[in-house]
Amino acid sequence: MECELPSVNSNKQEIKEIFKNIKTIAVLGLSPDETKDSHRVAKYLQAAGYKIVPIYPKGETILGEKVYASLAEVPFAVDMVNIFRKSDALYAITDACIVKGDVKVFWAQKGIVNNVAAKKAEDAGMKVVQNMCSMVEHRSL
């Protein structure tokens, strides 16, 4: 499967600023399965000092944090949404971020690109990163 090339994307300097300025990361699609990429990436970011907010349809805790079934259920501000979902899901995720109103960064993981949803997120004032692994990018800084 080929994904489209990102036409909306942050550069390395913006990514550096993102990691410097955020504190809370909602991980959409955070699996409780330790072998899954979403779990490994979230665990790494948590160890790096970020507060992780698991968004997953079932379960009570992942990585010691309360699980929420949707972004709308999170009762506090979220700086970044880190997305481990299919590209088509980004339309609804963008809308959820806009409704939440406090999301500063819309990050679609490696292999996930949706330029229409990304443009909408950018137009709403969010920094956008697509088709990049947040763990790999953080480590490179």
Image: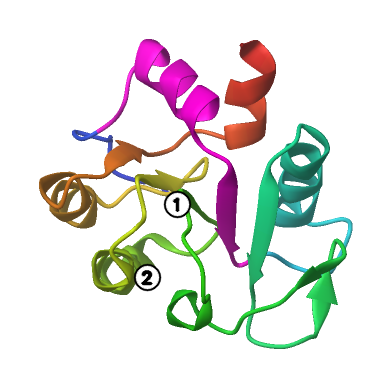
Instruction: State the residue position of label 2.
Output: 89
Which numbered circle lies on residue 1?
Answer: 1
Tell which of 59 and 108 is nearer to you: 59
The magenta span reads 9-29
Residue at x 15%, y 52% (from the top left corner): 124
Q: Position of residue 30 (x, y in %)?
A: 68, 64
Foreground mark, 2 or 1, reads 2
- Against 75, residue 93 (above or below) is above
The amino acid type, in three-letter code, at marker 1 is: Met
Q: Confirm whether the magenta stretch covers residue 98.
A: no
Residue at x 83%, y 37% (from the top left corner): 47
Alpha carbons under labels 2 and 1: distance apart:
16 Å
Q: Pointer 1: residues within 10 angstroms few (<14), some, or many (20+)?
A: few
Q: Is residue 12 left or right of residue 31?
A: left
Which numbered circle lies on residue 34?
Answer: none
Residue at x 26%, y 68% (from the top left corner): 91
Q: Position of residue 82 (x, y in %)?
A: 52, 51
Q: Quadrant of the C terminus?
A: top right
- Against 29, residue 127 (above or below) is above
Q: Residue furthest bottom?
A: 58
Residue at x 48%, y 17% (from the top left corner): 16
The amino acid type, in three-letter code, at marker 2 is: Ala
Q: Position of residue 5 (x, y in %)?
A: 28, 35
Tell which of 32 and 69 is nearer to you: 69
Quadrant of the rendered structure where residue 17 is?
Answer: top left
- Against 59, residue 104 (above or below) is above
Q: Secondary structure at mark 1?
A: loop
Q: Closer to the N terminus: mark 2 or mark 1? A: 1
Q: Is residue 37 left or right of residue 105?
A: right
Q: Secondary structure at mark 2?
A: helix
